[in-house]
Image (cartoon, rainbow, N blue to C red):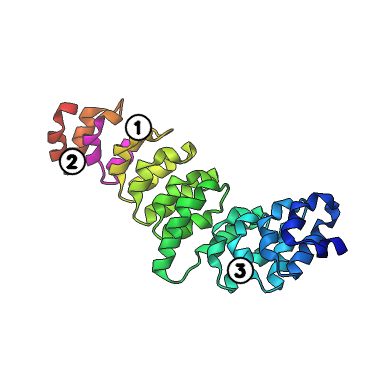
Amino acid sequence: QILVLKLSTEQLIKHLGVFKKKDYSAIAEMLIEKGEAKIVVRYIYSFEGVNHNELAHKIINKGEAAVVADNVIHFNDLDLSVARVLVDKGYRRSLGYPDHFQAHIQSAVIAMYLDVKDKSKSEEIAKNFSSYTLPGLKDVDVSVAYSLIESYCASGVIECLNAFRLEDHFEIAKKVIEADKAEYVAKNISSFSPATHPRIAQLLIESGSGWLVTQNLPNFQGVDRLRTAQQLLDNNAGRSIAYGLAHFPGLNHVATAEALIEKGEGEAVVENLSSF
């Protein structure tokens, strides 16, 4: 301890290897008590084996939450209480690095980060998050996707579908379609789990966007083309069949033309007569 007190902080960090690793925590705490929290955090990886979360709590308890907030990227495995304190003290922006918090609470941290009452700020934060942070995450809870979609970032969610679990892809597609962004789903159907394609196609058709299914049908996997054609006819979207007839191999052209004419879509048949 006498040696530690005689050394400058920079010297101490530089010669940390002469101390036993079991003493690293005590040394870090001593430096924090001396008001050197910033330097401790800057060289936190030199303190091998030190619990980052405990260190963050000690710094916060010393009244230096700003040091933690400004240097979140230097920490690992921070807990939810650290996140709450940072938000309470006005450092919500620091939660924009959820991968530096414990894995099982990352979705909760993201939710706290996105929970901004000011609509204009909320949209900006959501956009930045989906552009810069989301691409590097995995197994993010579907509630985060919902929050982003509600903040007008549906395109960002679809561009980063790999950040979400495959089993959540259908619900994400459904939420995007409900947000009147069906085109995003249809045009990027290849990004969704193939297992969801038949249900997504049906959802698009039933929601009045059947033409998008026809337009992007080559990219839908596992979809029964003949059944899809019938669904389009049943949901008053048969017109798109005439314009995308090549996407429906095996379809009875005569019967289809008759069905379209009966539904008042004779013009579409005439305009595409060469395809029948």
Query: Which residue type does callout 2 highlight?
Result: Glu
Front-most of residues 273 and 119: 119
**Dots 3, 2 in contact, CB < 8 A:** no
Q: Is residue 244 visible?
A: yes
Location of residue 15 with respect to 8 vertically, above or below: above
Q: Is residue 157 left or right of residue 25?
A: left
| Bounds of the magenta segment | 229-245
- Residue 51 appears anywhere in the view: no
Identify residue for label 1.
218
Amino acid beneath label 3: Ala
* Residue in the picture at 35% in, 52% down: 181
Camera-near label (1 vs 2) is: 1
Label 1 neighbourhood size at 10 Å, few (<14), some (14-19), many (20+)?
some
Q: CA distance from mark 1 to mark 3?
A: 53 Å
Where residue 150 sits: x, y (%)?
42, 61
Q: Was residue 238 drawn as part of the magenta stretch in this picture?
A: yes
Name the mark nearer the viewer: 3 or 2: 3
The front one of 33 and 113 is 33
**For residue 245, side relative to residue 223 (left or right):** left
Helix, strand or loop for the magenta stretch, by majority: helix
Query: Circle 2 is placed at which residue position?
Result: 262
Q: How many other residues sit within 10 Å of disc 2, few (<14), some (14-19) or many (≥20)?
A: few
Quadrant of res 97 = bottom right
How many tags in the picture? 3
The residue wearing badge 3 is 66
Q: What secondary structure is marked by label 1?
A: helix
Mark 3 or mark 2: whose residue is earlier in sequence: 3
Label 3 Cα neighbours within 10 Å, binned few <14 / some 14-19 / many ≥20? some
Which quarter of the figure is the N terminus placed in?
bottom right
